[in-house]
Amino acid sequence: MSANDKTVELTTAQAIVRYLANQFIEIDGEEVRLCGGGFGIFGHGNVTCLGEALYEYKQELPLYRGQNEQSMGFAAAAYAKQKLRQRFMFCTASAGPGTSNLVTSAALAHANRLPMLLLCGDTFLTRLPDPVLQQMENFNDPTFGVNDAFKPVVRYWDRISHPAQIIQSLPAALATMLDPADCGPAFLGLPQDVQGWTYAYPESFFKQKVHRIRRQAADTCEIAQAAALLKTAERPMLIAGGGVQYSQAVDELTAFAEAHQIPIVETIAGRANLTAEHALNIGPIGVTGSDSANAIAKQADVIVAVGTRLQDFTTGSWAAFAMDAQFISINAARHDAGKHMALPIVGDAKLALGALGDAINDYSAPADWTNLAKAERVKWDAYVADNVSTDKNRPNSYAQAIGVVNALCDKRDRVVTAAGGLPAEVTANWRTLDVGTVDVEFGFSCMGYEIAGGWGAKIAQSEREPDADTIVFVGDGSYLLMNSDIYSSVLSQKKLIILVLDNGGFAVINKLQNNTGNESFNNLIADCPTVPQPFAVDFEAHARAMGAIAETVATPQELGEAFKRAKQSDRTHIICMQVDPYNGWTTEGHTWWEVGTPHISKSDKVHKAHVEIESIRPQQRKGV
């Protein structure tokens, strides 16, 4: 900006919106607006100023009215995930509880490294009317309020105390959201008076800008060190995480594996890096994984982790690998690349895989190792086929429902689930039909993400793949926690297909409770001591009340016919089916998972379970 730059007088809120409307990004040769719009619920803290500003740009930045601030944040996170972090949505909430409702969704976006801009009201900077409605007073620090609660769950935080500050703060927020190494939510606290204050902004600040996401080349010494190690491997393995897709490195990962015949396993976030039919796809790894992936993980001597933060469900609490296995970690984030004494390759996955491939030249994994991995996958496929089968007389299960939908959906349909038992069941049993079609939110394992995330994913999907469906798997527990975006999807004409699988409560935690020797208590509705007469919710009637088409089925066969009808529906379609809370779980494919158990107990069963769980601890790696 020069000293002669022309200026335009705008309110702080007007300047924020105008700036966002002029930020673009190039995707597949086309320049599109970086911000896809927003989700908003207005209150006194944002309606008069920010609402006024957004009205002027309602075409450029479409505003979706949410029903709950938390679910708005989930929808924004799912939108960003569907867009491979190349575009984002903003969320706006009023001061007070509207804003604090967004803390959980900010945490979800932070855990999953997803961009989201939070524009939240705040108390008056002048403090003249204090204490105001919904203000959280802290007697010893008047600057400390509800918005400070976001500091641990966002990557960028600022409170705008003067209109000129956004000249620096907005670009910094966008830079954070577009940084592959530091990607996550950005928060701007907007005091109600400051939103309406004016400033003579330089017109150049609002000039259209086209952003590009940085591709950081890896250090040549790190590539050389990693190549030297990998060339010694007798039993190499690749772990493909969600970062592979965000880097758009699926082709490079596949080419690398094929050129060197290295088996690939997928994390939960990395599901759908490869289709199920790919010969080197050995399956999902970890606590919610597959026998095939976990079998080779236990034997692998050199493991190349690509675009994964290696959380405990991937690593089996770091008991899934041989104690002497050596790690090479390719990651844009330095913090992730160095975990467990890995040889780090800090940089973009697409570039790093190419450089590493060149460095190992004609190295190829021993044929007997690769053939062993493929044979393990064949056995796992046979288990899954039996697990999802509806031919046998057995109780309704998650796996059966997953198998029915998997067989009938189109290859570009997107599957969304989160929390409870369904992430494990989808991860283990879903056979990927096309790259980038699975969203299992398990970074924050957040109940309530499913339907809201499905809505956000469908908004994103509609922009480029309007004929593809978004399919949501949700349990009764998560449905009851957060379901109002069924109404949102109907209002906005963003059709979802939602499978409500009712097992009478929090059945997967009941299973964990039982598996650790405890009696069923306060998880299944039938086991709640404060519930005199348990009864089932009529989910069909509830969904119909929000404008959706809804039906209830009794068997997986009926579910299949209902799913065909849902595919033909012109609006959100709910299919409800009861599943057994005790039987039908996927029993294979699990690694050890560290959970806290009582070291002493009056129950012999609890003590026995504790001893069994602790017996695996010597296999746990002690790296950092």
Image (cartoon, rainbow, N blue to C red):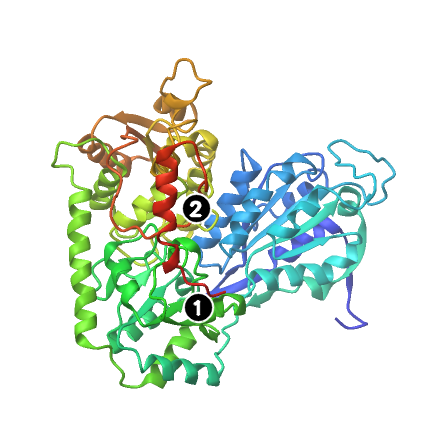
Q: Which mark is residue 595?
A: 2
Question: How many C-alpha atoms fall within 10 Å of the one at disc 1: few (<14), some, or many (≥20)?
Answer: few
Left or right of residue 375, residue 241 in this image: right
- Residue lying at 39% horizontally and 68% vertically, measured from the top left: 305
Number of callouts: 2
Residue 148 higher or lower than 67, as above or below: below
**Would you name the residue on which mark 1 appears?**
29
Q: Which residue is drawn at 69% across and 45% down?
A: 147
Image quarter of the N terminus: bottom right
**Residue most extreme to the top:** 532
Percent coordinates x, y for residue 462 in the rendering: 40, 48
The three-letter code of the residue at mark 2 reads Val
Q: Residue placed at 39% from the left, 26% from the top?
A: 543
In the rendered image, is residue 495 in sight?
A: no
Task: Inspect the image, locate mark 1, and give the three-letter code of the amino acid beneath it.
Answer: Gly
In the rendered structure, the answer to whether residue 16 lies left or right of residue 386 reads: right
Categorize mark 2 by other alpha carbons within 10 Å: few (<14), some (14-19), many (20+).
few
Q: In this view, does 519 lie above or below 444?
A: above
Provide residue 532's location: percent of width, then percent of height. Answer: 42, 13
Q: Nearer the viewer, residue 207 or 72?
A: 72
What is the x, y in percent for residue 447?
Answer: 46, 39
Choose between 108 and 587: the one closer to the eye: 587
Q: Where is residue 159 in the image (x, y as percent from the top left)?
A: 73, 51
